[in-house]
Amino acid sequence: MRRHPIDPNLFFDPDYDERLTAPPKERGFLVAAEVRSARPLLNAQDSLDELELLAQTAGIEVVGRAVQHLQRIDPATYIGSGKVREVQEQIALLGADIVIFDDELSPNHQRELEKLFGESVKVIDRSALILDIFAQHARTREGALQVELAQYQYRLPRLTRQWTHLARQAGGGGGRSGNGGVGLRGPGETQLEADRRDIQKRIAKLKQEIEAVRAHRNRHRLQRTRQGIPTVALVGYTNAGKSTLLNVLTDAKVYVADQLFATLDPTTRRLSLPGGKVVLISDTVGFIQKLPATLIAAFRATLEEVSEADMLIHVVDAAHPNAAAQIETVEDTLAEIDVPRLPRILALNKVDLLPEGAPPLRGADRYAAIVPISARTGEGIPRLIGEIERVLRESMLEIKLFVPYQRGDLLALIREQGIVDQAQTTPEGTHIRAHVPPRLAALLAEDKL
C-alpha cells in the first residue's frame, strides 16, 4: 500500500502551548438593578452591554446576565433575597465563578453578598472591574501610582479578613505595607486593624509621590505657557478614537486598540497649523459612565492637562447607538473635575461607519464648531485642523504693548503665537497692537516673561 507523506503543518497549532499553559478565563455573570424612579443616561441592558465589554477587556468570559427591577435598592442584599437565589441558580447552571454588579456596591452590600454567594464565587462591582483594567493598562510610573492609590482608597472601607487575597492585586504596591511585608502589630491590635493601618500609611506615601509627579508636570506646563504655545486637549468617551486622531494629526505613534481604556497615560505632541502657528495636542484618559470617584480623584493630576488647556476637542463615536449619552457623560465628568468653560470643538468621529443616509449626530450650542470626521480614513481632518486654527484665533485677546529693543524675544514670541495687528517702531522700541492666546496675555500683563 502506498503511503502519502504527512504534512507536519497540518497538525501544527502555534497557539497550542500558550493555551496549554494559560490559566482558564474566569466566567462572569452580570447583574444590574433598575430603580424605577432613577433616570440613568443608559438603560439597564445598554449599561450591561458596556459592562460586558469591560469584563472582556479584563479577560473575563461573560456567560449570563440578569436585571432586577426595583422601587428602591434593597438595604441588605442590593437586589433582594429572591433575586439573589435566582442568580445563585443561574451561576451554578452556567458554571460562573464571578458575579459582577453594574453599580458600585456599598461595603455593607459587598460583605452581605459575599456571605450569601459563598467563598467559591467572587463578588465585584463595576468600580472594582474598572480599577482592575486600569491596573492592567498603566504603563508609566505616574499611571501605576494613580491606579494603586485608587485601588487602596476603594478597598479601605471594604476591609475584611479576606483582604490579604485582594492585596495581591494592588498595582505595583508590593504588599500591604508597601515593602512586601506585614507591619508589626501592637499589643491587642487585631490583624484587621494592622491591615487598615498599613493601607493608610501606603495611601499617604502614594499621595506624596503623586504630588511630586504633579509638581514636575506643573513645571513643564509653566515652561510651555511661558513659551506661549497654545494647548489643545483631546477628551472623550473611552474607545471614541482619541489616540487614533492624535496619531493622524501629529504622527504620534500612540498605541491604539479596539478596546476600552487601551491607553491611560497622557501624550503631548506638536501640530503645525496652516497659518504657521504651532499648538500642542494632548491625549488624555477616556471617560465612561459610573467612573469610580476614587479613580477621578487619583487621576486629578493627569486631568489637570485638560483644565490648563486653551481649547478642548471632544471626540465622540458618532456611530455608537448611545453617542448622545456618551457626550453627556464626558461633559458631566469635565464639570466634576472643575474644567472651566474653555472653547471646544465637537469632533464626530467614525462617520465612515454610519449607515448611508443616516443624519449625523448634532451637538449643542456649547460647541464652537461641530466637525464630522473619520480618524481612520482621514475624512474631515483638514477641516478639523482649520477649525482648531479659527477657534484659537477667535479666543485670542487684544493687547497693546511697548516692547523695548532689548526685549526682541517678546516681539518674536508675539509674532509666533499671536496675530500682530499694528506695529510702530520708535528709537526706543516698538509699540505693538496684537491678538495673543489668553495665557500669553496674562503673562505679558504680569511681566513674567
Image (cartoon, rainbow, N blue to C red):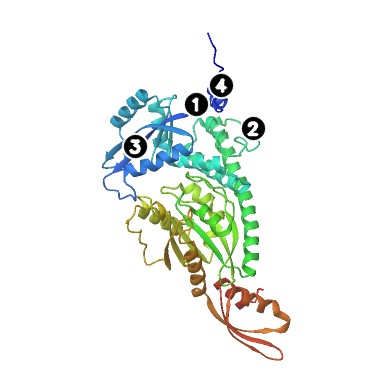
Say which element carries label 1: loop
- Kindly report the distance in space between the C-alpha atoms of the residues bearing marks 1 and 4: 31 Å
> Badge 2 is on which residue?
181
Name the outermost residue toward the right. 406
Q: Quadrant of the C terminus?
A: bottom right
Select label 1 or label 4 by which is in front. Answer: 4
Dot 2: few (<14), some (14–19), or many (≥20) neighbours within 10 Å?
Answer: few
Q: Is residue 213 left or right of residue 30?
A: right
For marks 1 and 2, the one nearer the N-term is 1
Say which element carries label 3: loop
Verify CB contact (< 8 Å) between mark 1 and mark 2: no
Q: Which mark is residue 7?
A: 4
Select label 1 or label 3 by which is in front. Answer: 1
Say which element carries label 4: loop
For marks 1 and 4, the one nearer the N-term is 4
Q: Which mark is residue 78?
A: 3
Select label 4 or label 3 by which is in front. Answer: 4
Looking at the image, which is closer to me, 381 or 79?
381
For marks 4 and 3, the one nearer the N-term is 4
- Kindly report the distance in space between the C-alpha atoms of the residues bearing marks 1 and 3: 30 Å
Q: Is residue 175 left or right of residue 289?
A: right
Looking at the image, which is closer to me, 394 or 225?
394
> Badge 1 is on which residue?
24
Q: Is residue 185 left or right of residue 396?
A: right
How far across and how far down the image is residue 357, in percent?
32, 56
